[in-house]
Image: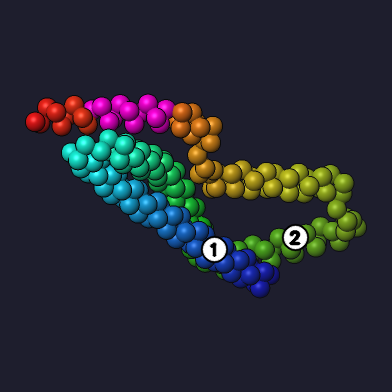
Amino acid sequence: MESIVKQEIENMKKEYRSAKKAVNQSITLVKKAEQQRDEAKEQMEHWQVKAKKALEAEKEDLARKALERKQSAEKKINNYKVQIEKRKEVAERHKSKLKELKERIEEAEDRKDELIAEAENARATQEINETLSGLGDRSAADNLDRLEDKVSDMQAKAQASDELYDDLEGDDLEAEFEALEDDDSVDDELAKLKAAMNKDE
């Protein structure tokens, strides 16, 4: 029984190491999305300056292209913001699971001797009862209970998996509708930029 308890604790430690890797991966994904957001912001500012220079040179077509690039960068920024929030939520859930698992390992380590004694006592009690009753086999009801427990465990694991791995993909249909508005949006921004420049003159 001692070896069984120690093995279970070791299994928990392996699970903890795997969970720790998942936390590190989640944090890495957040950092990556933040970096991509910052790069998109730089691109947006870059094309805004280019559009203004093009208008100053009376090259409206060139200004329009620059504003299209700017708007594309703005969309990326918004998408990355959404990804960052979702990935942070996943990372926090991973951290919470990691903390919970660490506490369970510490508790198991503290109670190791107690658990071994309880396991030995339970085994001895079971052997005595089986000897006295003359029934060494489990009943059909016991088997059913074990089956129900396994099904419940599988359902709980499936639900936990759904919560840990959220879908970070955007809505493609929404993106298609946004694309329909791109041309009008560029025209509006071009007009605003012209008006601002005329006002400065």
Closer to the observer: label 2 or label 1? 1
The amino acid beneath tag 1 is: Ser
109 left or right of 116 in image: left
Identify the residue at image location x=81%, y=57%. 129
Q: In which quarter of the image is the C terminus?
A: top left
Q: Which amino acid does label 2 sit on?
A: Thr
Q: Which residue is at a point 31% across and 37% down the rendered structure image?
A: 61
* Residue 147 marker: none
- The image position of residue 119, as x and y in percent, is 67, 63
In the image, taking residue 106 as reference, residue 3 lies left or right, namely right
Query: Which residue is labeled 2 in the image?
Result: 125
Is residue 114 something one can see in this rendering?
no
Q: Earlier in the sequence, mark 2 or mark 1?
A: 1
Residue on which the image places disc 1: 18
Give the residue furthest to the left: 201
Residue at the farthest front position: 58
Name the foreground residue: 28 vs 15. Answer: 28
Where is 11 relative to 95, above or below? Answer: below
**Residue at (23% x, 27% y) in the render:** 192
Q: Position of residue 24 (x, y in %)?
A: 44, 60
Q: Which residues make up the magenta segment?
A: 181-192
How busy is the neighbourhood of tag 2: few (under 14 within 10 Å), some, or many (20 plus)?
A: few
